[in-house]
Amino acid sequence: MQSSKIEWTNDTWNPWQGCKKISYGCVNCYMYRNKKRYGQNPGIIIRSAPATFNAPLTKLKGPLIFVCSWSDFFIEAADPWRDDAWDIMRSTPHLTYQILTKRPGLIADRLPKDWGDGWPNVWLGVSIEKQDYIYRLNQLTRIPAALRFVSYEPALGSIYIANFLQELSIDWVISGGESGPDYRPSHAEWFTRVREQCDDWGVPYFHKQNGGNKMIDGAWGGRWLDDRTHDEIPGNVLREC
Ligand code: SF4
């Protein structure tokens, strides 16, 4: 069964934990909130215990694995451990790894030597919460990858990405509003604008949630946008649960 609560993946894998806030979208980071609740310091980056670090080799079924939901895969503090994580991804080609970062400027120097045009089982994505961070897409599109994606969550302003979609340099778009006790409201027209850009260029679009602090049909703020849900995933590889 699906072990992750994140709708666009099957499982999460956290080879390390902890992070540093670097962006407007980090203000209400759920990892910070949860770690503090457990009495842990979220600003200290630590390698996870072997059972967690090696989980793709033992228990994760995928096929989609979201990497580092409690950190950033490319954060500098994880440099000593990243080759071990790449080794695990290389040895599990039956799993597809979704790596999402707010630090795309660090990717190029941290890819494995045999990366080539990108491993078929690794997707690279960036988070863009508002137009100010579009430069992350520019950085990402300079990196070879089997599939590139953008997560527009938490959406904190309207964005325009049609030029990237038109050039076929971005293959998938996810969106979602912020949730949690201090959520910053999003507006339906922001999501509609992104959905229309994806429609125009035939790019798969997945709308995760509208955001807020009310659960509607299993998602914060519900998932309906423009009279329906939007559940597209490249290759339709999400395992049913
Ligand atoms: S980059 Fe992600 S994990 Fe790190 S502080 Fe920001 S929101 Fe949290």
Image (cartoon, rainbow, N blue to C red):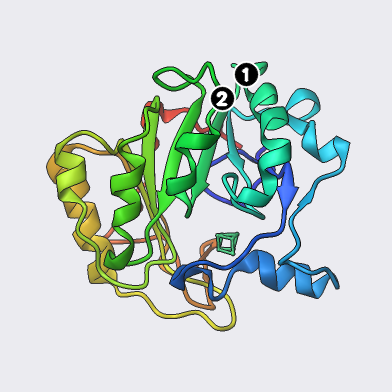
Q: Which mark is residue 112?
A: 2
Residue 182 vs 5, above or below: the answer is below
Q: Position of residue 108 (x, y in %)?
A: 45, 36
Numbered mark located on residue 217 in the image:
none
Mark 1 surroundings within 10 Å by alpha-carbon count, few (fewer than 14), some (14 through 19), many (20 or more)? some
Say what secondary structure mark 2 lies in.
loop
Earlier-in-chain disc, 2 versus 1:
1
Q: Quadrant of ligand 1?
A: bottom right
**Disc 1 element:** helix
Pinpoint residue 34: horizontal percent, then vertical percent. 73, 68
The amino acid pointed to by label 1 is Arg
Q: Is residue 79 above or below residue 35?
A: above
- The answer, for residue 54, to whether it is visible in the render is yes
Q: How many marks?
A: 2
* Front position among marks 2 and 1: 2
**In the shown orientation, is residue 56 left or right of residue 200?**
right
Alpha-carbon span between mark 2 and mark 1: 10 Å
Tell me the residue at 29%/67% (across/down): 132
* Amino acid on which the number 2 mark rests in the picture: Pro
Proximity of marks 2 and 1: CB atoms separated by less than 8 Å: yes
Asked if the residue at label 2 sits under 8 Å from ligand 1, the reply is no
Q: Position of residue 5 (x, y in %)?
A: 62, 52
| Mark 2 crowdedness (10 Å alpha carbons): few <14, some 14-19, many ≥20 | some
The residue at 76%/24% (across/down) is 57
Q: Is residue 226 visible?
A: no
**Vertical comparison of 223 with 47: above or below:** below
Q: Position of residue 70 (x, y in %)?
A: 67, 55
Residue 90 numbered tag: 1
For image coordinates 48% across by 52% down, the residue present is 103
